[in-house]
Amino acid sequence: MFGKMKYVRFVSEFGVDSIIIFSNLMNHAQTVRGIRHTEVISAGFVFFSEGAFICYGRSESLDVNSRTEDSDMLTKQMEVV
């Protein structure tokens, strides 16, 4: 599907807890500047393996770590209904 990418989990201005994924060539901090959010919860890297998204690592530019539950949340978020 795709190789290693980056992700950010945040709470939107409307209180929605969401994750976005984007190219690993982009910077975490620069990417979230364009998103209306109230709080960055976690960030790091992500890849897809065996039907699930795996989140890991940390964002140096945002100074936040990934969280264990991010993988399950992103996998559920990306499910096709």
Image (cartoon, rainbow, N blue to C red):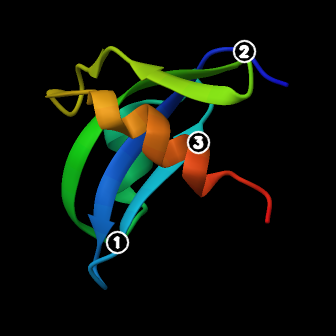
The alpha-carbon separation of the residues under discs 3 and 2 comes to 16 Å
Q: Nearer the viewer, residue 1 or 31?
A: 1
Do tag 3 and tag 2 residues touch (Cβ < 8 Å)?
no
Q: Crowding near pointer 1: few (<14 within 10 Å), some, many (20+)?
A: few
Q: Which mark is residue 75?
A: 3
Give percent across and percent down for residue 55.
44, 24
Which numbered disc, 3 or 1, marks the residue closer to the eye? Answer: 3
Give the left or right position of residue 72, taking residue 30 as reference. right
Which label's residue is closer to the chain start, 1 or 2? 2
Residue located 43% across and 30% down the image:
27
Crowding around mark 2 (Cα neighbors within 10 Å: few <14, some 14 to 19, many 20+) is few
Q: Nearer the viewer, mark 1 or mark 2?
A: 2
Q: Are marks 3 and 1 in contact (CB under 8 Å)?
A: no
Residue position for label 2? 3
| Residue wearing tag 1 | 36
Q: Quadrant of the N terminus?
A: top right
**At which x and y percent is residue 54?**
52, 22
Residue kind at label 3, given as amino acid type: Thr
